[in-house]
């Protein structure tokens, strides 16, 4: 699978391709592809909503727009009429795109209700070992079973048990910070799609950094890679990723639906 000369993260590229419904990301020059995909009409693993349009751009410049078939023509016309290159639409443009999609004849469960942006960071063995060692608190532990107590506001990563990967920091008798690899189905043994949460009163103590480092270490030790995404406005989360060794790798913009109870066929 071609991933492009400027894109060394092979496992992450395969994972992105699966999520987009394409054979590969990268390797096509500074271009933009529009790809109709039935993946856009149902929720992805670990998400309760569908992304009827998923615009994914590598930092190297190549981009793919994966869209629900019902809006492929609308999206293609919008992009063509504006001579839009691979760069993500700005906020005003994205709102205009959302309004154009609303004019398409979509079933109610597929009508997008919002715009979501993400910065996507990548990490492999070379990134991790090249970075200063992370000082782990003595209470850092790999979580392998349900039944622990978690601080208010932290979602227990029970979907990781018994054979997933999750690390937490214990304070007193409860977990106050946790990082885990989502159960993503394809490639979940190769790619750690990270989730991380820390109780507000325990932030700025290095706990989240230690948990993220624990998950990443477990994956890169067996040749895997890690994927970390967050909002462009969430600077603390971006700094957390970079403090472990993650590098900016891609960006995305999605038009997402409300939560869906079941996949559309």
Image (cartoon, helix red, strand yellow):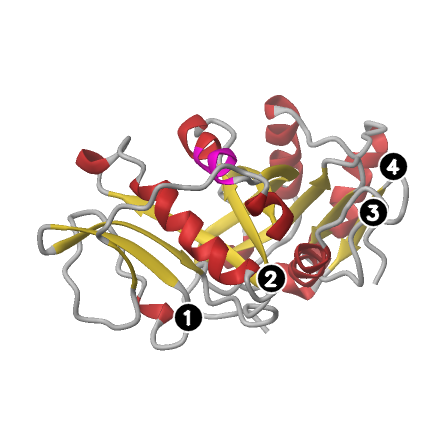
Residue at point 55%, 46% (across, down): 128
**Quick one: label 2 or label 4, which is nearer the N terminus?**
4
Distance of label 1 from label 3 (alpha carbons): 34 Å
**Quick one: label 4 or label 1, which is nearer the N terminus?**
4
> What are the residue bounds of the magenta stretch?
240-244
Quarter-of-image position of residue 15: bottom right
The mark lying in front, picked from 3 and 2, is 2
Residue denoted by label 4: 30
Residue at the far left in the pictured view: 172
Quarter-of-image position of residue 11: bottom right
Q: Badge 4, how many Cα within 10 Å: few under 14, some, many 20+? A: few
Q: Are the residues tagged 1 and 3 within 8 Å (C-beta)? A: no
Residue denoted by label 1: 164
**Quick one: label 1 or label 3, which is nearer the N terminus?**
3
Residue denoted by label 3: 33
Left or right, 226 with reference to 200: right
Residue 184 coordinates in the image, percent (x, y) = 52, 66
């Amino acid at each position: 699978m071609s991933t492009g000369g400027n894109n060394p993260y092979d496992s992450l590229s395969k994972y992105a391709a699966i999520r987009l419904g394409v054979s590969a990301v990268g390797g096509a020059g500074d271009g933009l592809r529009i790809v109709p995909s039935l993946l856009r009409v149902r929720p992805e693993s670990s998400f309760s909503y569908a992304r009827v349009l998923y615009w994914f751009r590598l930092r190297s410049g190549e981009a793919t727009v994966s869209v629900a078939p019902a809006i492929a023509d609308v999206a293609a016309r919008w992009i063509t009429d504006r001579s839009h290159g691979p760069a993500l639409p700005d906020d005003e443009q994205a709102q205009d795109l959302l309004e154009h999609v609303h004019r398409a004849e979509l079933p109610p469960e597929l009508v997008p209700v919002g715009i979501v942006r993400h910065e996507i960071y990548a990490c492999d063995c070379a990134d991790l070992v090249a970075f200063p060692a992370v000082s782990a608190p003595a209470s850092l532990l790999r979580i392998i079973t349900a039944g622990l107590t978690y601080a208010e506001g932290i979602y227990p990563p029970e979907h990781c048990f018994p054979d997933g990967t999750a690390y937490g920091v214990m304070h007193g008798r409860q977990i106050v910070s946790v990082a885990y690899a989502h159960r993503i189905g394809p490639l979940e043994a190769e790619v750690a799609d990270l989730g991380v949460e820390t109780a507000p009163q325990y932030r700025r103590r290095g706990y989240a950094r230690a948990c993220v480092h624990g998950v990443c270490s477990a994956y890169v030790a067996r040749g895997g890679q890690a994927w970390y995404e967050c909002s462009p406005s969430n600077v603390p989360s971006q700094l957390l990723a970079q403090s472990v060794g993650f590098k900016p790798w891609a960006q995305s913009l999605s038009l997402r639906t409300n939560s869906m109870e079941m996949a559309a066929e």
